[in-house]
Amino acid sequence: MTGEPRERADVRGGEGATAYRRARAGARVLGVTLVIVGTPVTASPQEPEPAAPVEVDARMEPVGISPGGAFLRAVLVPGWGHAAIGSYTRGGFYFGAEIATAYTLVRTRQRLDEARGHRSLVEAALRQDLTAEGITDPASIDARLDEDADLRELREVVEAREQQQEDLVALGLFLLFLSGADAYVSAHLADFPAPIELEAAPSSHGRMDVGIRLRLPSN
């Protein structure tokens, strides 16, 4: 009788120990699961994708003004050829010189027309007077006209205005082609640096040392 309860107690104790071990193992598994689930997952930083290389079309790059283009611009519009290559001072000079010449030419042309009109009126009045006097010979009329002081002075004024007009036309053409030639040469030399620099400094011997620096183009 005494052995049966002890056997049952051992059996029950064995079953309880087994259940305890199972429960403890389940608790460990549950704890590991909670730890895994509760651990924050940090996303690995994504590396930036390399930018695609930018292709540059050489035809889209700015192109400098050619010497011929600078010459043509300078001939069409005063100072345009120099302004196109960045030489604004020279462009302003040629613009002012050519505009002043053109304005003076226009004014001279107006004065010439006025002098010619005045001369024609005086000459017509003199011819009428000579005809009224009975002088009809052309040679005699021309001789009397040449002797008139007022008409002779008007003729001199007309001749001076005509000469001035011719000089202004020649000057305008000269400035026009000079501007074009200067723009042509300046476009050729646009890539060259300042060619010569003069340097002077006192020396230790009481003299002045003078030097010349010549810069060559990098190309």
Image: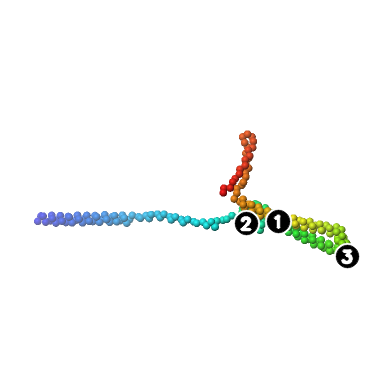
Q: Earlier in the sequence, mark 1 or mark 3?
A: 3
**Image spot of residue 15 (x, y percent):** 18, 56
Task: Tell me which residue sits at (77%, 56%) in the image.
Answer: 163
Q: Does 128 appear above or below 34?
A: below
Task: Tell me which residue sits at (29%, 55%) in the image.
Answer: 32
Q: Is residue 138 left or right of residue 166?
A: right
Q: Which residue is mark 3?
A: 136
Mark 2 residue element: helix
Disc marking residue 113: none
Q: Which residue is mark 1?
A: 173
Name the residue type under label 2. Gly
CB contact under 8 Å: marks 2 and 1: no
Tell me where residue 73 sits by quadrant.
bottom right
Tell me if I can see residue 100 in this picture: no
Residue that protrudes farthest toward the right in the picture: 134
Name the residue type under label 3. Thr
Q: Nearer the viewer, residue 211 or 128?
A: 211
Q: Earlier in the sequence, mark 2 or mark 3?
A: 2
CA neighbours of label 2 inside 10 A, class few (<14), some (14 to 19), many (20+): some
Q: Nearer the viewer, residue 86 or 56?
A: 56
CB contact under 8 Å: marks 1 and 3: no
Tell me where residue 122 sits by quadrant.
bottom right
Q: CA distance from mark 2 to mark 1?
A: 19 Å
Disc marking residue 69: 2
